[in-house]
Amino acid sequence: MSQKFRLAEGGRIDRTRPVAFRFDGATLYGYAGDTLASALLANGVHLVGRSFKYHRPRGILSAGAEEPNALVQLREGARTEPNMRAPQVELFNGLVAESQNRWPSLRFDVWAVNGLFSRFLPAGFYYKTFMWPASRWMTYEKVIRNAAGLGKGPAEPDPDRYEHRNVWCDVLVAGGGPAGLMAALAAARSGARVIVADEQAEMGGSLLSDTTEIGGSPAADWVAAVFDELHATADVTVLPRTTVAGYYDHNYLTLLERVTDHLGAEPDGKTPRQRFWKVRAKQVVLATGAIERPLCFRDNDRPGVMLAGAVRNYVNRYAVLPGRRAVVFTNNDSAYGAAIDLARAGAAVKVVDLRREPAGDLIDAAESAGIEIMDGCAVTGVKGGKQVTGVTVRRLDEAGDEVAGGSRSMGCDLVAMSGGWNPTVHLFSQSRGKLRFDDGLAAFVPDRSFAAERSAGSCNGAMTLSACLKQGAEAGRSAASDAGFKAKAGSAAPKVDEPETGATRSVWVVPSGKPLGRGGKHFIDFQNDVTAADVHLAHREGYVSIEHLKRYTTTGMGTDQGKTSNVNALAIMAQLQGASVPEVGTTTFRPPYTPVGFGAIAGRNTAEFMDPARVTAMHDWHVEHGAVLEDVGQWKRPWYYPRDGELMRDAVNREVLAARNSVGVLDASTLGKIDIQGPDAARFLNMIYTNAWLKLPVGSCRYGLMLHEDGMVFDDGVTTRLGKNRFLMTTTTGGAANVLTWLEEWLQTEWPKMKVFCTSVTEQWATVAVCGPYARHVVGSLTEYDKLGPRDFEFMTMREMDVAGIPARVFRISFTGELAFEINVPRRYGAALWEAVWEAGQKYGITPYGTEAMHVLRAEKGFIIVGQDTDGTVTPMDLGMDWMVAKTKGDFIGRRSFAREDTARDDRKQLVGLFTEDPHQVLVEGAQLVEAVKPAPPMRMVGHVTSSYYSPNVGRSIALAMLIRGRARMGQTLFAPRLDGGAPLEVTVTDPMFYDRGGVRARG
Amino acid sequence: MFLIECPWCGPRSQTEFHCHGEAHIARPKYPDAVSDAEWADYVFNRSNTKGVIYERWVHNHGCRRWFNVARDTVSDRILAVYRVGGKRPEVTP
Amino acid sequence: MVEKKKTGKAAPKPKKAKAGPAAKPETAAAAPPVAPAAKPTAAAPGVAAASPLDGRPGTGIDTAVMVEHPHAGKINLRGDPADQAFLDAVRDAAGAAPPTDANTVATAGRNEILWLGPDEWLVVTPEGEQGAMETALGAALAGQHVSVVDTTDARTTIRMHGAHARDVLVKGCPLDLHPRAFGPGQCAQTIIAKADVLIHQRDDAPTYDIYVLCSFARYLWDWLVDAAREFS
C-alpha cells in the first residue's frame, strides 16, 4: 500500500477507504475520493502515455477537463472506453486502466522512433507525403491509423443502460464553483426552478483546492452550507458529476450526468450508467471557470511538467505531492499559491518568474516562506525523458525574445508552470456569444451575449474570489428576474480577504538560445503534437487564416478541442504576423465541451426501441403462422408465409397461384384512410385528384392519382363516397401521414374558406382483403351470399353489412385484378374477422399472401406502386394513365405543369413492360437499359427497371420499366448490363400489362 | 433545437413541428393565365433569404395547425409567429 | 404481473343501422342530406374484441402503475368554436361544451372532451357508448358544417399513475410536465419516445391518460415499462 507521494494529512480523500486499481497491469492503491490521476501521482507514476505523433513520453498535465496527455484506455471488454482523461476518472475498487498509443509497452515504444525523424514529420506532413499517388492513400491510411490511433473502441455491444431526461427550468447554472453556487443560491431564493450542474464529484470548483476563507470560515464550510440550502429548496436540482456539454439554439442545452461511472459497478439492469439531460432553460448562468495556460518552453511536455493550478489541486485536495523538488515557472502571481502550498507540504521549491521584480502579497509570502525567486528568468530547457530530472534557467532580455546571460542548471522532479488563465468560454461561444480579447488577462473573455445567458466568475474574466462571488450573486439575481421572478434580499456575496496581485507578462514562445525546433520541442498542442515550430512553418508557407492554420497544423483538433493550446497558437501566429491577437481572430468552440459517448446520445433508443414497430390487429396471427415480415415504413407487414423449408421464391409462387386460382387473404390494414367531409368535399377532391369527383355516386369507389404542383405523381388510392358530403380516401401505406398533411396544407393555407374536415381513420379499421375466384364463396359464407352477386354488389362499390357478426364496410375493389372483397371492421374485431375468414376459406384452400405476392399480382396487371415505379419525376402521361386525367373539369393541382416545356417534351421516360430473352431470368430492379452494349461504361442509358418478378401465372419473368419514348419501342430489343459482370441480358419491350388484359376477372 | 411558440399550444420543442418552406406564396388564381416563368416562380423558385424569412410551419405532432413564422436565418431567432392569412409582420432581426 | 382491464365480450346491443345504399347507387345530386346515422359499433355476442395490449406484462412497481383502457368511446369532433350554435349543440349532446382554452379538458359526468386543436376535439365516453354519442352529436349538429367520426378503435389508452409516473414520461416527452406547467385537467398532443400521443393529466397522483394509436401501442407500452425499470 505504498503511496510514497501521499501527504500524511489533509485532502478531501477518505483514508479509511483504500481502493485497489490496476494501471498497465500493476496493482496500485489510492483512496476513495481520488481520481485516477491523483492516485497515480500518489504512487509516483508520472509516465502515463505516449504522444499522438512523436510517441513522446507524457505525464499528467492538469487536474481537469483540459487534460491533453493523460488519456487512458479505461476498463476492459464490452465496457472499455478510450481517451478517458485520468484527472476526471474517479477512482473505484477494481478500476483497470491502460496507457495508450504505445507498443509493445509504455516504457519501450518502438514508434518513438518517430521522434528521431521528427524533422521529417512537420505540420501538413500527411497532406504532403501520402496524397500521392492518390491510389495508395488507402494503404497509407491503414498504417498511419495503426501507428497513430489513440485508444480502442469496444468490440462488444454496450451492456449499460443510458437514460434521457427532458427538463424545463427557469435558470440553469453551468458550473458549481464559487460563482455558480452563488448564482444558484440567488436564483433559488427567488423561487425560480433552478438546475445547477458541475462536472466534478463535489460542488465547489476551485474552492475545493483553495486554502482561502469565506466569511471567516474555511471555503469548504461555505460550499457545504450552500449545498445544503440548495438541496432543501423546492424545485432546485443540484447535479454533481454532470457536464453541461452543449449549448444550442433557443437556450436548449444538453447535460451529461455520470450516474454510476464512479462506482465501477456491473450493470444491474435498471440503473443507468449515464443520464443525458435535455434542458430548455429560460435563462442561463455560465460559471464555467478558467483553464490555466501552459508556457511554451523547450521540452515543456516532459512528464513532471504540470500546470501550477493542477499542482495546487493535487496537494490540497488530494494530499498528493507531485514532486519533492519543484521549480515553479510563471508569468503571473497565481502560481505563487502553488509554490507556497508545495513548500508547506515539504517540497523544496524555487520560482522562476518571467517578470522582472514582481511584487505583491503572494510574492512576499513566498519569500518569507524561504522560497528562492529568480525574476526576469525563464526555464529554457528540461532534462529527463520519462520524468523531469532538472531544468536550465537563463535570464531573458528586456523584450523577452532572447536569452541573455549564462545558464544555470538545477535538479528537480516537478515543474509547475503558469502562463496565465483562459476563461472557459466554450459554452458562451457555443451560444453564439461574441468574444473580446482582454489585454490585461491576455485572454478571450465574453463580450456580447447572443442567447439568454450571462457569464459570471472567472469564465467572465473575474480572477479574484470576491469578484467571482459578487458576479455570481448578481448573475443569479438577474437571471431569475429575467425569468420573471423577484429577487429576495439576503443574497449578497459573502466577504473574502484576498491578496493584492500584480500584472502578467506574456512571453508566448520562451527562447532557449537555440533556433526554434532544434535540440528540443516547444509544444503548443500536447494532444496533437503541434509545436511552435509548426506554427512558424505554416506562417512561412503562407497560411494567414487561423482556421486554415488549425486544420493544417491540427492545433486544437484533438478530443480536448485545444483547451490548453488555442490561445497560445493564436498569439504566436499574431506575433509572426505582427498583428494583435484579435486581428488574427479566434476559434469557434463547438459542442460538446468534453466528449459524450454515443451510448448516452442514443439513450434507450436502441434495438427494439430504435424505431417503433407498428403492427396491425392481425399481427400475432401472422407471426404464429410463420410470416416473414417486411418493413414498410414503420409497419411490420407479412412479406410471405413460407411453409416448412420452403424457399421465398416457392412460397411467393404458391401464394400468387392461390390468389388467382382459389382464394388468397391479405392483411391490408396498413393502407392510409382519411375521412373527408363537408359541403365542399367533392370540390376539394376535384382539386386534389387528377380525375373528376363531383358526380361519383354515393356508395361508389374511384381510383385517384395525386400530383404535386410540379405535375408529378406522389400518391394514389381508391376513394369512396360515403354520403353526399362525405368520402373515405385511401392512401398508400407509406404515404398516409404525408397525404393528410398535404390535404390540411391546402385547406388551412390556400383554401381556408372551403368547408371540409379531414380526419385520419387509418387505425380505426382493420382490413382483410379476400381475393380470388372463390372470394365470393368465402365472404358469402360469413354474410348473406345473395347480397354479393355481381349485380347486387358491383365492382367499385361499397356496402355496409355484417360479416361474421361484425359490422363492416365491404369494398369491391381489387389491387390484384382478381375478384376481391376488402372487408373493413373496427380494429378490435380485426383478429376475429381474420380467423373467421380463415376458417370459412379452409375448404377452398385459402392461402394468406404477403406483400411480395401482392406486388407480383399487381405487376401482372401492370398496376403501379407509387414510390417504386415512380420516383417523383413521373407524370400520369408518363405512366400511360392519360385516362386518369380529366380534360374538362378545369383546374387541379399539378395540371398547369403539364404544359411546362420539360413536362411536355416527347422524349420522356414512359412505363413499359419487359420480357427477358430467357423466361426464367429475372431482371434486377434498378437495372439500366441500353440500346447497344459496349465493352465497358459509359453506355447511353435509355431507361431503368422499376419492378421485376417471376410470374407463375404468366409462366415467365415480367418486369416494368421507365423507358425513353417507351411506348414507341414496342417489340424493340434492348439490353440490361449487369453489375455482377455476367453477360448483359437481352430484353424485349412490351405492353405493361401481362394478365387478363380485358379486366374481366375483377368484375366477375 | 428551436423552441417554437405554436399560436395555439404555446412553446413546444421543434421536434413536434415540421417546416414547409416559404410562406406568402399564393397559388395563381388562374394557373392557365400565367406564363411558364410565373408558374415556375410559384412552384420552384424561393427567395433563400439571408436575414428575415417568412415561412410556414405545421405543429404536426400537436394540434396539426399550420402557421407562419418570421425567422432570422442568420441568428435562427424566431421574431414573430402569426396565423395563416395574417399580414406579414414587420420585424427587425 | 398483468395489469389489464378485462374487456367485456358482451357488448351492448348494437343499434340497428340502415343497410348500405341500394343496389343501384344513388347519384350525388339525388342523395338526401346525410344526418350521421347511429352506427353499429359492436359485433354479435361471442365475437372476441381484442385490444392491442392484451396480456402485456406491466411495470410491476406501484410508483408507476400502467393499465390499459382500450375501449373507451372516442369520437373525433370538428366544428367552429366561434359558432354559439355549435357549442350549444355539443353541450346538449355530450353534457359539456367543447373547451375553447387550448390543451384543456371539459368533463361532464362520465364524458370528457379533450381539446386537440382550435377546431378539433376528442369526445371520450364510457365503453360502448360511442355509437349513442355519435348519433346524439350527429342529431344535435344536423345542418352545421361539422365532422363527427368514431375513432374509438384507432387509439388505446394507457393509464399511468404513481410517484414516478412523471419521471418515466419525461424520459421521452419533450413537453414541460412539471406541476408548475402542466396539471390536472390539462391535455396535450405531443411525443413520447417516437410515438405521437395525447396526454391527459387526471389528478395530482399524478395520473396520466396516454392515448396512442393502436399500431404504436406495444412499442410505447414496452418502452414505458422499460423506462420504469429504473424505479423498481
Image (cartoon, rainbow, N blue to C red):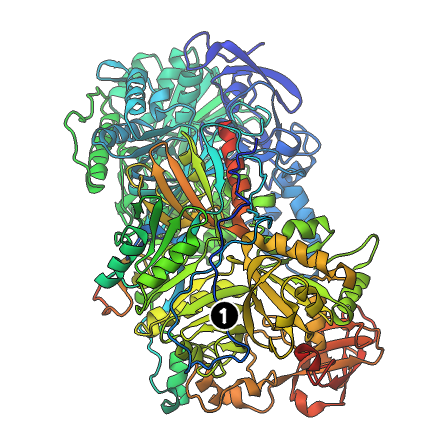
Chain letter, disc 1 residue: A
Which quarter of the figure has residue A2? Answer: top right
- For label 1, count other residues whose C-alpha is less than 10 Å away and answer few (under 14), some (14-19) or many (20+): many
Q: Decide: is A550 above or below A493.
A: below
Identify the residue shown where x is 46% and y is 83%. Answer: A695
Identify the residue shown where x is 51% and y is 57%. Answer: A763
Three-letter amino acid code at disc 1?
Met
Q: Decide: is B78 above or below C229.
A: below
Q: Quadrant of the N terminus of chain A?
A: top right
User: x, y (%) of residue A657?
Assistant: 78, 69
Residue A715 in sight here: no
Q: Decide: is C146 above or below A955.
A: above
Q: Secondary structure at mark 1?
A: strand
Q: Is residue B34 left or right of residue A119?
A: left
Q: Is residue A553 left or right of residue A642?
A: left
Identify the residue shown where x is 52% and y is 42%. Answer: C7
Residue hosting label 1: A729
Q: Compare residues A690 and A894 and report the one nearer the observer.
A: A690
Which quarter of the figure has residue C93? Answer: bottom left
User: x, y (%) of residue B16?
Assistant: 40, 54
User: x, y (%) of residue A753?
Assistant: 30, 74
Q: Compare residues C165 and A484 and report the one nearer the observer.
A: C165
Q: Compare residues A866 and A812 and report the one nearer the observer.
A: A812
Q: Decide: is A606 above or below A216.
A: below
